[in-house]
Amino acid sequence: MNISKKADSLAKWSAIAIGFSVPISTAFDNILLFVILISWLVGADFQKRMTVIKSNPVALAALGFFGFLLAGCFYGQANATEALNYLGKYLDILFIPIFILLFKEEKTRRLAINAFMLAMGLTLVLSCIIKIGIFPKSFLLQGTPDNPYVFKLHITQSIFMAFFAYLLALKARYSESSRLRLAFALASALAACNVLFMIQGRTGYLVLAILLVYYCFDWLRWKGLLVAMLAFILLGTVGYFGSKTLNHRVTEAAVEFSQWQPDEANLSSIGVRMEFYRNSLELISEHPLFGVGTGGFPQAYADKIRGSGMWATGNPHNEYLLVAIQVGLLGLGVLLYLFYQHWRSANFLPTSLEQSLARGVLLTIISGSLINSLLLDHAEGLYFAWMSGVLFAGFTGVLQNSKDKN
């Protein structure tokens, strides 16, 4: 085996390993990404690689979005260090075409998804163990029985666990074995319970709700919306009256929202977010087309609230506002185009399972980005890039209408 083939093999196995590391270890993620990049560069046949990338609309849209952020480094309020620091947080997007090239084989894609499921399964088990008080808090297991997050903070775990519940539900739906269907269904229910009744991540509530609606609609079409509505009523009633965690988080959010007043400093979680959103929208109106430049948000926001007593931030906790402020409505349009191509191109994936999974990934990011800057955050941004690479490596360019199970 020559050096090029060895490098390609190392890059593929490292890419598979990211599925296990992304819910667990940022340090391991960075090591693997470095290995992938070096190994990929050592590999040969760049012309063939470029042909594959040019024929994949998701890869092209990802490059277009990153290119817009790169262009934003050359104007605006941020200095070179600040601009490059923010651009670096979006480097995961640049890996989408690389992942697409590495996951061309169906076996590699299957191993990658299994690696992610293994990591999330481990997270779920340990979270349940922490919940019942068996393990004390440590540098590995961070949570407490009142908030049993494991490797990542509760917001990140709630997002990943909501998607994991959706993934398991899809596995149950498409499994041929009745025993496997039951096992996946029970595991999906447990993952959903982890989001709703164990960890304190309100973003997870939103993501789980959106994925539940889409799952029911994707499966049963308009009848599925009725099923989703009934599920909302049942879960909401049981959760609100039967779970102190869910009851407290929902009630707290409602109270904080009711107490928020425009133009007045507020230190509550919801109140601060409302400040961020209102001031961010005003910044967009002041710099609508091209924004303040990549990395320019912190200074622009600080200037905006100077003397008001409001909390300065480098992150408005909304990806759409953050992108629009940095690279304008044109840049936001490029991001939305990436999301559009992601949704549209799912029709060209080989199986129904992969099509539904790809749209679930996108809905996770779209919904979570309403109340968090997910692409700016390492774990969530890498999750989106990696999952996009895994799934759209199977892009066929031919519209798929089959109902293959796997």
Image: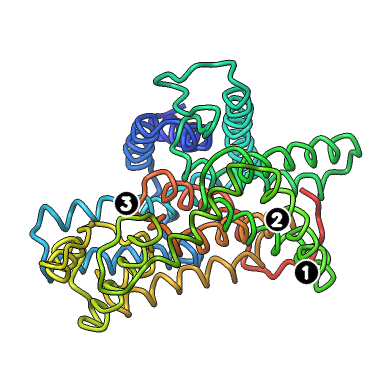
Q: Find residue 91 and name its label.
A: 3
In this rendering, would 363 be left or right of 378?
right
Q: What amino acid is labelled 2 in the image?
A: Gly
Q: Find residue 391 and name its label.
A: none
In the image shown, does 244 or 97 lie closer to the viewer? 244
Q: Tell me, yes or no, whether the two marked residues, 1 and 2, touch with CB atoms within 8 Å.
A: no
User: x and y percent of residue 316 in the render?
Assistant: 31, 62
Q: Give the mark nearest the N terminus, 3 or 1.
A: 3
Q: What amino acid is labelled 3 in the image?
A: Leu
Mark 2 burial class by Cα count in 10 Å: few <14, some 14-19, many 20+: some
Give the image quarter of residue 165. Answer: top right
| Mark toward the viewer: 1 or 2 | 2
Q: Give the mark nearest the N terminus, 2 or 3.
A: 3
Q: On screen, 256 above or below 75?
A: above
| Mark toward the viewer: 2 or 3 | 2
SS at badge 1: helix
